[in-house]
Amino acid sequence: MKTVVVGLSGGVDSSVAALLLKKQGYRVIGLFMKNWEDDDSEEYCTSRQDLIDAVSVADRIGIEMEAVNFSKEYKERVFSRFLEEYGAGRTPNPDVLCNSEIKFKAFLDHAISLGADHIATGHYAQVREMDGEYQLLKAEDGTKDQSYFLYRLNQAQLSKTIFPLGNMLKRDVRKIAESAGLPNFAKKDSTGICFIGERKFREFLNRYLPREPGEMTTPEGKTVGNHIGLMYYTIGQRQGLEIGGEGEAWYVAGKDMEKNRLIVVQGHEHPLLYRSSLECTDLSWTSGRPPHRNWVYAAKTRYRQADAPCCIVRLDEACKIDFAEPQWAVTPGQSVVVYESRVCLGGGIIV
């Protein structure tokens, strides 16, 4: 009997993943990961309740359960990078780093030490082996597909990973949980950045990075307001600018780090909010090989976005991607993820 260690978060997705694997005949061990300890109070952090839910599910399914603390690894590998990126005026995606550094590295190493043949999570994605190579595929449920957050997984990680929910619809997952009597079948999905929880983002960030107020200006240099610190804003942001006057809404179009100015424009369709090309670095390709240049692929520059036809026109230490249609609010620090049909090829960090 093969052993699979499932990352049990206390949510419905990972719970059903564990249930399905048990039914398929695996020896299943549930592993709850605690990744954050600073100010771990019930007011903001749900980890205590999540652990209770995970233990309840393990008991209901009839599987072994263990909790492990990866807070030190998380702080060193994910949170420090998060602060570094925000301090440089970029908008990082900690979920991408958490997957590659914690859930599929620290967690995988720990699972193997427990004698696991595979690990599994409740992510909506799929793995397929083709001619000895492992491919990361989009989930069947296009509204829940999470391959965007998993693009940094390599061959060694993919070869050990099972995604039991990859060919399922979310509504069916909840039905399975309810019919199996899982206590968390109706639990809301978690949203936002895990270590921030329900607290206000600006208040949280201000504890780690000092505010540096400055001017909001138009591209022509006209001052129209003041910002509280460039790190608190992201490209395409509309809320919280507090610029008075008439006309269309204001949006963040850029950051002048040297002069500490936030560049803002009026109107969702302003030309400065669109980019026909981008450059990315810190590249990661699931096959271990870069894709072909000058082929037509598709790419996303943010999670909730339709695939956009594109072409890779330069590929060395960095990568230059041209889009068939200009893309709105391309944001430095975010990930651009490249696809060939349903196959996720990998990507990089937008600069």
Image (spheres, grey):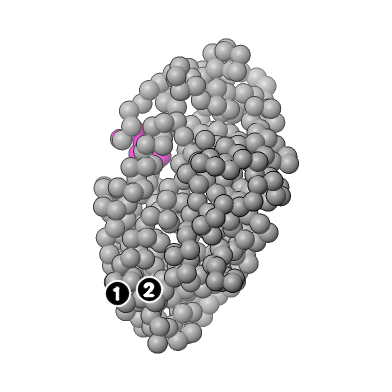
Residue 296 visible in the picture: yes
Helix, strand or loop at label 1? It is loop
Q: Amino acid at mark 2?
A: Val
Helix, strand or loop at label 2? It is strand
CB atoms of marks 2 and 1 within 8 Å: yes
Q: Amino acid at mark 1?
A: Leu
Residue 48 lies, in percent from the top left, at: 30, 61
- From the viewer's perspective, tell me whether residue 71 is left or right of residue 284: left
Which label sits on residue 5? 2
Residue at screen point 38% across, 23% down: 212
Dot 2 surroundings within 10 Å: few (below 14), some, or many (20 or more)? many
- From the viewer's perspective, tell me whether residue 209 is left or right of residue 230: left
Dot 1 surroundings within 10 Å: few (below 14), some, or many (20 or more)? few
Which label sits on residue 114? 1
* Residue stretch in magenta: 200-207
Residue 108 lies, in percent from the top left, at: 36, 66
Task: Residue 199: name its quadrant.
Answer: top left
Residue at screen point 31% across, 35% down: 208
